[in-house]
Amino acid sequence: MVQPGGGFDLSQIMQQAQQMQQKLVEAQEELANTEVTGTAGGGLVTATVSGDSQLKNLVIDPKVVDPDDVETLADLVVAAVRDASANAQKLTEQKLGPLAGGLGGGGMPDLGSLGFGG
């Protein structure tokens, strides 16, 4: 990246940034097409989210449905969705972590300021 004489090869830096952006887009698409689950109440409530944390499905075992205690059901639903979202976050870190590590910094820079979509 550093040229003889101490200057930076801007075209090489831009090419690497474009490659990183493409890899990021591919990883984000893969995440959006991946589903992970979370459970609560010993499996009585199961939430399925996409890798980008979009709720896709919610399964509630009829045993947990009590018209006199809807608060417990609501708590279980929230817990299952949170568990699924946490699993999606772990998956995101696994998929995107190597991309961030290749930058030599602690995280992904805002490539939008360089003219790359974001």
Image (cartoon, rainbow, N blue to C red):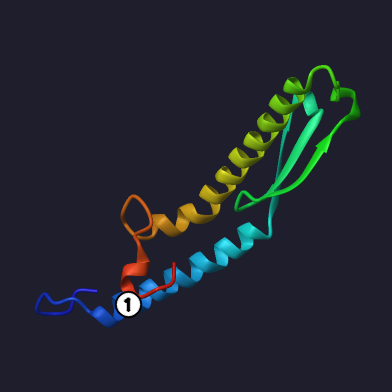
Q: Quick one: which residue is furthest to the left in this view?
A: 5
Q: Quick one: which residue is furthest to the bottom in this view?
A: 11
Q: Secondary structure at mark 1?
A: helix
Q: Position of residue 46 (x, y in %)?
A: 77, 36
Please report the residue visible at 59 percent of the width from the left and 48 percent of the height from the top. 91
Please report the residue visible at 23 percent of the width from the left and 79 percent of the height from the top. 9
Q: Quick one: which residue is furthest to the right in this view?
A: 62
7 left or right of 97? left
Query: Which image quarter is the C terminus in?
Result: bottom left
Q: Position of residue 96 (x, y in %)?
A: 50, 55
Please report the residue visible at 38 percent of the width from the left and 57 percent of the height from the top. 108
Front residue of this view, candidates 53 and 30: 53
Front residue of this view, candidates 28 and 63: 63
| Mark 1 residue type | Met
116 left or right of 5? right
Q: Quick one: which residue is furthest to the front in this view?
A: 68
Q: Position of residue 31 (x, y in %)?
A: 62, 57
Residue that mark 1 sits on: 14
Find residue 69 and report its image quarter. Answer: top right
86 is higher (above) or lower (below) than 9: above
Please report the residue visible at 49 percent of the width from the left and 65 percent of the height from the top. 24
Find residue 41 and report its image quarter. Answer: top right
Front residue of this view, candidates 1 and 113: 113
30 is higher (above) or lower (below) than 107: below
Q: How many marks?
A: 1
Q: Position of residue 29 (x, y in %)?
A: 60, 64
81 left or right of 69? left
Disc 1: CA contacts within 10 A as few (<14), some (14-19) or many (>=20) = few
Query: Which image quarter is the N terminus in?
Result: bottom left
Find residue 2 and report its image quarter. Answer: bottom left
